[in-house]
Image (cartoon, rainbow, N blue to C red):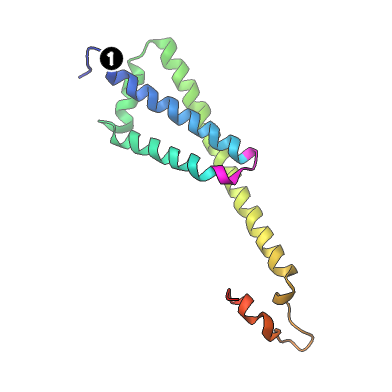
Amino acid sequence: MSSPSGIRHVEPLAIISDLIETVEAVREILETNHPEQLEEAVSRFEDIQKKIDQFPGGSAAIAAVLEGLPTEKNSEYRELLERAKLQHETNQSLIKLAIQRNAALQSYSAQSNLAATYSSEGGVPLSSVGKLLGKT
């Protein structure tokens, strides 16, 4: 049941537009290496997912709205969604690489930390035991 003013059609399209913009923003943040902006973008993405879940009928209803659009508009949104899907997959790969890079940097940092090395007798200097255990 759609409203005469077409409001039911506007909201799902706005949700789709927000989704596409947010996925693109996350990719830009990842590519330009601005992790401080990532939390806000991911939060926006999660909000959009909630909107989709809370939309009456969920994603199936949003897909039905797309099907009800004129062919040209339907194709335009489908192409945008396909592009967003590919960008989202790329984002996942970029996040995995960032996690691996971070783990490598942490490992390198730990190895280059003098307090993390053993003495020639095999012991750890007492002054650095607290640092190794995360206490200073």
Side (left or right) of 132 relative to 16: right
Total marks placed: 1
Side (left or right) of 56 relative to 87: left
Q: Secondary structure at mark 1?
A: loop
Side (left or right) of 43 relative to 3: right
Q: Where residue 59 sits: x, y (%)?
A: 33, 31
Q: Where residue 79 sits: x, y (%)?
A: 49, 21
Asked where in the image residue 128 lies, by quadrant, the reply is bottom right
Q: How packed is label 1: few (under 14 Cα within 10 Å), some, or many (20 or more)?
A: few
Residue with the most extreme front position:
136
Q: Nearer the viewer, residue 12 or 68?
A: 12
Which kind of residue does numbered mark 1 sit on? Gly
- Residue occupying image coordinates x 75% and y 68%: 112
Q: Is residue 70 above or below residue 79?
A: above
- Residue occupying image coordinates x 25% and y 30%: 56
Residue with the most extreme left position:
1
Side (left or right) of 40 relative to 70: right
Can residue 77 be found in the magenta stretch?
no
Provide the residue span drawn in magenta: 31-37
- In the picture, the quarter occupied by the C terminus is bottom right
Q: Where residue 38 sits: x, y (%)?
A: 54, 43
Give the labeled residue for mark 1: 6
Q: Is residue 12 above or below residue 38?
A: above
- Residue occupying image coordinates x 23% and y 17%: 2
- In the picture, the quarter occupied by the N terminus is top left
Q: Where residue 58 sits: x, y (%)?
A: 30, 33
Q: Nearer the viewer, residue 21 or 63?
A: 21
